[in-house]
Structures are given as C-alpha cells and as structure tokens.
Image (cartoon, rainbow, N blue to C red):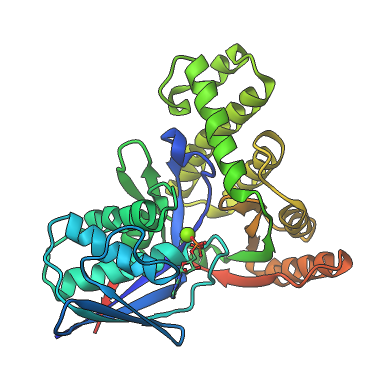
Amino acid sequence: MTARWAAPGRVNLIGEHVDYQDGLVLPFALPQHTTATVERQSGDQVRVRSRGEQEEFQVASTPGQVQGWAAYVAGVVWSLREEGADVPGLSIDVDSDVPVGAGLSSSAAIECAVAAAIGDELALQLSAASLATIARRAENSYVGVPTGSMDQMASMLCERGHALLLDCRDLSTRQVPFDLDAASLTLLVINTRAEHSLVGSEYADRRHDCEAAADELGLSSLRDAEQADLPRISDPVHRRRAQHVVSEIARVREVASILDAGRPADIGAQLSASHQSLRDDFEVSCDELDEAVDAALVAGALGARMTGGGFGGCAIALARDDEATDVRRRVDAAFDRRGWQPADIFEVSPNRGAHRLD
Ligand code: ADP
Ligand code: MG
C-alpha cells in the first residue's frame, strides 16, 4: 500500500508574537503545499527523497542523530514512536512548492505531510490535532526549533475559505469565514527575501521582555493583562512589549468578529495597526518590511502588515481586486528605488489543511 498526503504552508493573517504569551492567532492555509508519499520497505531504515536529494536513517534514530533537512522527517518518525507507534522501514518521497525559509512554514508543511502519510499508511487512527502535536514535537525536540503550535495546527486543521482562530492557551480552534473571492478582494504575500541575522537572539529577548512584564503584573502570561494594567510595568521597554501583546490580542478578536459578520474588506485598519505595533512597540520589523507595507498602503491597499517573526520574510497586503496590480507595481518600484533584489509577490487565498491524495 502507498499513502499520499498534502499539507500546506500557512500565513498568519493577524496575531503576531502573541503565541508564547497564550494569545490568539488567526492563520490560514496557503495554496502552496508539500506532498509526502509513504511506502513500507523491509528492514529498519527510512529512506527519504526531496529536491533531488536522498537521505537514509534508522527508524529508531533519536534527537541529534540526523541533521539537516532530513531531521524534519526523522523528527516525525521519532515523535510517532514517542507516541507509541511501531514504525517499520519506510520509503518517503517529498515534493513541495512552499517557499523555504520565508516564514510561510515549509517546515510545518513537510512535518505534517509526513506525519499524516505515515499515520495513514500504518492505520494509526490519529486525529488531525494529535498529528499537529506530533509534528510540533518533531520541530521542537528533534530539529530543536522552539516554535509555538500555530504552524502545525494551521497546516493540519485549516479549511478552504476560512482562517483558523487558534487559542494558544488551550489549543481550542474555530473556523472563521474568510472568503476573498466573494468580496472581490485580493490578498498578496510579499516575500521580501530579506534575511537579517540576530533573529534567534532577538526572539529570545522578546520572549524574555514579555515574561518579565507578566511577572511584574503577577500574571502567568500577558493574555490576562488589560490595557489599564500596563502603566504598572516599570521598565519602559517591557511596557511597550506588553502594549503590543495586549493590543494585538484585541485586534485578533476584532478581526475575527468583523470576519464573522462577513465584512472582510473592513479588516484593513486592524492589519495596518498590527504592523505599526510590531514596528514601534515590539521592534521586530525591518526596512524591507516597512517599505513593502508603506508602498502597498500608498497604492491603495486596504491594510498591510509584516507577518511571521520579523526581521525579514514576508508582508501581506489586502486590496480590492482592481487595485492589486497597483500594489504590486508600487512595491516593485519601491524595492527597485532602494536597490534591493525584487520582492516575490504572489496572490493567495485560504486553502484546505492536510488531506489525503488518491
Ligand atoms: P519556514 O518554515 O519558514 O519555511 P524553517 O527554517 O522553519 O523556515 O524551515 C525550513 C527548513 O525546512 C529547510 O531549510 C529544510 O531543512 C526543511 N524543509 C522544508 N521543506 C522541505 C522540503 N520540501 N524538502 C526538504 N526539506 C524541507
Ligand atoms: Mg518553520
């Protein structure tokens, strides 16, 4: 038997840098996805092929034993075994059109496609949410990247025409309608292709700032903080970080309720406010992201923001269909003027999460 599954990358519509403070996030699945084709083979080895490369490792490998891209696959096998699964020798073929390293979660896409395909091939009867947990553990404990649960939950659970409202405190989810076509809207992903160093250390600093702010308020996380609490935070930097988290969680709620009311064209102001907050209070933007957002807004976008961790990667811009071309042109022109390599700009709409391919 062969099992073949697709799992998408994702973009976060709003709710940035709040996952590790028990916040709310609102990602949706991209049309770009990774497929994994899994077949049993004799022996106790896993052979995996992707992008013209082939790697092989022991089914019983443990964290640290497999490095490089194959660690994402070895991590899933390890994580399934941690879950109690009896994994035999396997042959796994991976294929993907998710941009790699751009903050669109090609890592969750490969983990989720592989986890779902192996789960299916071995008839493990795992729910989509448990597959997301298994995939996340692969990334956190095997690959060694300390991410939250958004990426894998989005890749497994999203539905076409919807964004996924995920509560990072208890991992509860709700599908929120986000039908761009029906509203004659275009959502552009602007991959700046910028990569700045210090991303890891800045990320750790922000987490620390937020923890310190929550501590001072006597809270386990900033999820429970309110605007009125913020003046009690003595360190001005910690106070601004908390200001971002508290206002961002409020914006997620507001966007979800506007989308529930079927008014997707009205979320623009919240998107742009999120960008300002990430730029000024949380300080995780960069020139390329700011330029992309500013150019999009000048061109008439309804709203635009950086998305993902920051310091490079992607921005998103929401525009009426008839203004999308102008947004692209303005961003291209702005990047050209600054002498930067052109941004990769493409249209996306909310797609379905992981699913079996026949
Ligand atoms: P992002 O998730 O934003 O794309 P990450 O750094 O988290 O960026 O993950 C990218 C890494 O995931 C790649 O460097 C590679 O190791 C692995 N990866 C993602 N997709 C594939 C693929 N199709 N084949 C092999 N490795 C992949
Ligand atoms: Mg990733």
Q: Residue furthest right?
A: 337
The quadrant the C terminus occupies is bottom left
Q: Foreground: 94 or 10?
A: 94
Residue 189 falls in which quadrant of the image? bottom right
Residue 137 on image: x %, y %: 31, 53
Q: In the image, what residue occupies the spot 38% across and 56% down?
A: 139
Residue 224 on image: x %, y %: 43, 23
The quadrant the N terminus occupies is bottom left
> Does the image show residue 218?
yes
Residue 106 on image: x %, y %: 46, 67
> Does the image show residue 350?
no
Does residue 46 lie above or below 102 as drawn? below
Does residue 128 lie above or below 165 as drawn? below
Q: In the image, what residue occupies the spot 17% across and 76% down?
A: 44
Residue 223 falls in which quadrant of the image? top left
Q: In the image, what residue occupies the spot 22% across and 78% down?
A: 45
Q: Foreground: 15 or 1?
A: 1
Q: Foreground: 326 or 223?
A: 223
Q: In the image, what residue occupies the spot 46% across and 83% down?
A: 51
Residue 58 falls in which quadrant of the image? bottom left
Does residue 149 lie above or below 97 as drawn? above
